[in-house]
Amino acid sequence: MDKVRVIEIKKSIYADNNARAELLRGELKEKGVFLLNLMSSPGSGKTTLLRSVIPMLQKNKLRVGVMEADIDSDVDARAVAETGAKSIQLHTGGMCHLDAEMTRQGLDALRTDDIDLAVLENVGNLVCPAEFDTGASVSAMILSVPEGDDKPLKYPLMFTVCDVFLINKIDVMPYFDFDMEKCRRNILMRNPNAVIIPICARTGEGVDVFAKWLQDRVAAWKKA
Amino acid sequence: MDKVRVIEIKKSIYADNNARAELLRGELKEKGVFLLNLMSSPGSGKTTLLRSVIPMLQKNKLRVGVMEADIDSDVDARAVAETGAKSIQLHTGGMCHLDAEMTRQGLDALRTDDIDLAVLENVGNLVCPAEFDTGASVSAMILSVPEGDDKPLKYPLMFTVCDVFLINKIDVMPYFDFDMEKCRRNILMRNPNAVIIPICARTGEGVDVFAKWLQDRVAAWKKA
């Protein structure tokens, strides 16, 4: 099998997925459920961020539900459930990403009738999740300081498709060779409209800025 | 297109790839070229490790060539070339992994007639690269301390298919909630034969242990 043939198969998956994602997005709009797709490398701090930001959102009367996607284990769903948010674990059966149909299955299992904001914590991976529209209202990614400021150069699509970029683990910046300004420039080169928020999910630093940004996006989306 | 159909396509890719990988492994054995497949998350330190270990290998008369795979940019190939090792950059055209055919194309471009050890630095990704046999003699993965000790629970296949595991960035252990013994247990649960070597690629700590392990494997393979 040559490479061209593989690419053709992938293209047909994408076209089909895009149509399903648009359909799901429309249905969620009708139900008043805002969907956030959260992506990053393994271990960048997706679950820690959720544990930090959910109480802030709950204080502002936002009802949050979380779908934790992983190939195996349920450690993340259990960790998020401690916030009081509804939380389920999705096992992807070895798949490296979530597509719109898998997201729909997750939302069905989560049940969204008592939720304003549904969060999909995608599989830790900077490549494949960027290729599949999940039907989300916005997409966020975390880049953590230990990963390096050069990641936008190497994973162009991920940095193009997201709306907001959280630079996490800024508390350990003194111990790493990470240049925040260079990182900003690299992200903006891929995505001139990028919103970039430095945070420390563990201590909560900057997480309030993200909470505010997200709440504003949800409010604007409800009015639209 | 339903999920089952996607899985069938993937299976046919795998079967085909396995045959190509076996063929490539046989050809490399005949030529006396040992192939190391190096995998990790984005930013775990693959390139930094290579810059640290290659001079140690060169000192022991091993002629090293490196293929740096990325979706975009050539920063890694330029960084590795500074060691004096032959180095080329492979662009994967958006692909999330290397398969045996792509590896063969890389080896053809690298030219292996003056090389004992060829290193394939795979795309930074803990999911897809584990699914494709590249034809390598051994596979290594780096898990860095900031990623967390729970990664073997979440990415089972990667921790099953590799021969050696380098726990990198041990210099920042005091600043992270990382339990080395728990990490060892999690890896050994996936892979009872795992060789686990704590290192700091940046300072060189422990890298000599990996260099020795690799040289011993090359020597044993040459005799076999």
Image (cartoon, coloured by chain):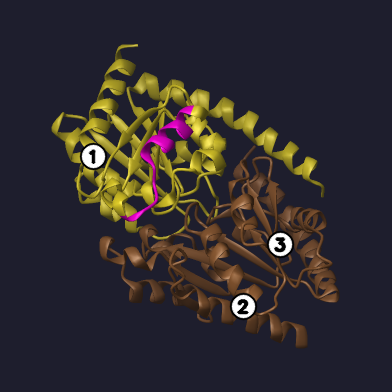
Chain colours: A yellow, B brown
x and y percent of residue B86 in the render? 72, 60
Frontmost residue, A115 versus A35: A35
Labelled pair 3, 1 in contact (Cβ < 8 Å): no
Tell me the quarter of the image containing the C terminus of chain A: top left
**A181 magenta-colored:** yes
Q: Residue at x 54, y 76 (%)?
A: B210
Task: Give the alpha-carbon distance from disc 1 to disc 2, as whole Å.
Answer: 45 Å
Q: Is residue A118 visible in this depiction of the protein?
A: yes
For discs 2 and 3, the disc positioned in front in the rendered view: 2
Mark 1 closeness class: few <14, some 14–19, many ≥20 residues within 10 Å: many
Q: Is residue A114 visible in this depiction of the protein?
A: no
Can you say whether A46 is above or below B205 in the image?
Answer: above
Q: Which region shows up in magenta?
A: A175-188
Q: Secondary structure at mark 3?
A: loop
Q: Secondary structure at mark 2?
A: helix
The lab-note entry on whether marks 2 and 3 share a chain reads yes
- Amino acid type at circle 1 is Val
Task: Give the alpha-carbon distance from disc 2 to disc 3, as whole Å.
Answer: 18 Å
User: What residue does disc 2 label?
Assistant: B214
Checking the image for residue B134, the label placed there is: 3
User: What residue does disc 1 label?
Assistant: A53
Q: Chain of mark 1?
A: A
Can you say whether A189 is above or below B14 in the image?
Answer: above
- Amino acid type at circle 3 is Thr
Q: Chain of mark 3?
A: B
Instruction: Tell me the quarter of the picture where residue B118 sits.
Output: bottom right
